[in-house]
Image (cartoon, rainbow, N blue to C red):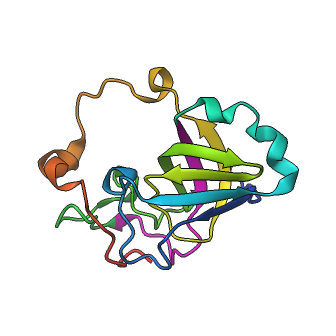
Amino acid sequence: MQRMDFLYRAIGVIHSPFAGVEGVPIQPASARGIGGTVELFAEFEDGLKDLTGFSHIILLYHFHRVGQARLTVTPFLDEEPHGIFATRAPTRPNPIGLSVVRLVGREGCTLYIEDVDVVDGTPLLDIKPYVPEFDHPPVERIGWLSPARDRIAGKRADGRFG
């Protein structure tokens, strides 16, 4: 198999109350009610047509504050190391993040969002509408996270992945 490299460019910037990695909620489930904005660059404004018809959107972004990639990490909700692809840790070979956030409103190129779990100034790569019929399949198992399920809400990052 041949390795392929790609080049992406930001389409905007995500703004949040979190100046650094430490203290950021580890997922939107831990960020209920925390507000932020998405500033789309003007050249992409036409792409926002009809987006406000959706209550939730998926943000894909670049983890711009992450150091070196790691193939094994000890996640916030466990004491044991796991393979990076079995976690949501940001120190990935391709540092791409994904968050499902509530879309509260829009003014021009600015989207108002809630449940934001992203560091302020994060470069935005893409936006997709969240559609439960597409994005919420029934789940049979959640691996090593099963025992930690009740500790997810309110969990904050401690900075160890920055």
Q: How many marks?
A: 0
Q: Is 126 left, or right, of 136 in this rendering?
A: right
Is residue 88 something that shows in the picture?
yes
Is residue 1 something that shows in the picture?
no
Q: Is 161 left, or right, of 17 in this rendering?
A: left
Q: Nearer the viewer, residue 134 or 53?
A: 53
Residue range in magenta is: 56-72
Q: Is 144 left, or right, of 89 in this rendering?
A: left
x then y, percent, for residue 75: 28, 64
What residue is at 57 percent from the left and 31 percent from the top? 54
Q: Quadrant of the N terminus?
A: top right
What residue is at 16 percent from the left and 67 percent from the top? 79
What residue is at 83 percent from the left and 40 percent from the top? 46
From the viewer's perspective, is residue 125 above or below residue 159?
above
x then y, percent, for residue 97: 52, 56
x then y, percent, for residue 55: 52, 34
Q: Nearer the viewer, residue 159 or 112?
A: 112
68 magenta-colored:
yes
Q: Where, by quadrant of the figure, is residue 138 drawn? A: top left
Q: Residue furthest top?
A: 133
86 magenta-colored:
no
From the viewer's perspective, is residue 125 above or below residue 18?
above
